Image (tube, rainbow, N blue to C red):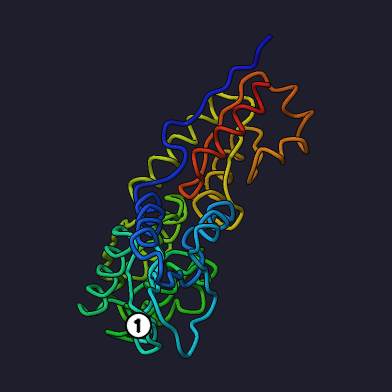
Amino acid sequence: MPKEIEIAKFAGFCYGVKRAVETVKKLKTENPERRVCVLGELIHNSQVIEELEKLGIETIKELPPQGEGICVVRSHGESPETFLEIEKAGFEVYDLTCPDVKKVQQKAIELVQNGYYLVIVGKKEHPEVAAIKANALQHGDKVLVAANTAQLEEFKQALKEHKKIGIVVQTTQMISTLNEIIEYLTPLAKELHIANTICPSTQRRQTEAKELAQRNDLVIVVGSKKSANTTHLAEITREITETIHIETEKELENYKNLIEKSQRIGITAGASTPQSIIDKVVAKLKF
């Protein structure tokens, strides 16, 4: 019997990622003689980064003391200090912070300015979270990051004494993580302000991934292992059905037996996964 393959409607590039990739390519086309570099990986996908490098768009890990040309701030955003440092080094700044990430930064600032103890739900090492925190700290020092309730334990007394607690969320976080943290903080606060800043694209993907897992014997999640939103999709589907997380179609060879015994296969992909990679995975499965 031929396998039934179902591809998620919301798989692949989200609006913010598509905008970032298309804009940086256009920037290089319009400035062929100028250096165009991105501070950090534009998106979490090595195939896209390689493609950009072939077009002459550099990825730099650290800002040099002296530079020239255009330096792009990636979709995750940066701290206000970093923007100043880019200019000071001699670059022209081109801000490609995702509009949804900008909204989280603005909400975080607003909560701190209004006297709330700010809790950023997310992973502290993630560049988006680091930028949200840095922006909020410009306006007050009552700011913390937590990816789970265990990380809130050491701040429990301080939060209780402060009484006013505000919450913002990394745009690619899981709604279940936010709900657990809300439940933990509710008894501690006299006033709790919750801003569910998980981006609509992430929420749609997570809901769809859950439904996909319920209908299929196997779910294949395609995308970078460094991508937060992609790994969360795999976590969601793994709780429901057999799941494999791959970066490219080449990895399918490692799961040959599992694929052979699965009749219904669902495919979803992270927001930084190009359509071309999804197509190659589908083609290999159909072959």
Query: Residue 92, position in %: x, y?
Result: 33, 78
Query: Residue 126, position in %: x, y?
Result: 50, 67
Q: Toward the viewer: 55 or 186?
A: 55
Provide the secondary structure element on which disc 1 rests.
Answer: loop
| In the image: residue 63, left or right of residue 28 | right
Query: Residue 76, position in %: x, y?
Result: 41, 65
Q: Toward the viewer: 255 or 236?
A: 255
Q: Toward the viewer: 51 or 221?
A: 51
| Residue at x-position 44% and y-position 34% | 208
| Residue at x-position 37% and y-position 77% | 160
The answer to whether 164 is drawn above or below residue 76 in the figure is below
Query: Residue 170, position in %: x, y?
Result: 41, 61
The residue indicated by pointer 1 is: 142
The answer to whether 40 is drawn above or below residue 217 in the figure is below
Q: In which quarter of the image is the C terminus?
A: top right
Amino acid at the residue labelled 1 = Lys
Q: Quadrant of the N terminus?
A: top right
| In the image: residue 63, left or right of residue 96 | right
Categorize mark 1 by other alpha carbons within 10 Å: few (<14), some (14-19), many (20+). Answer: some
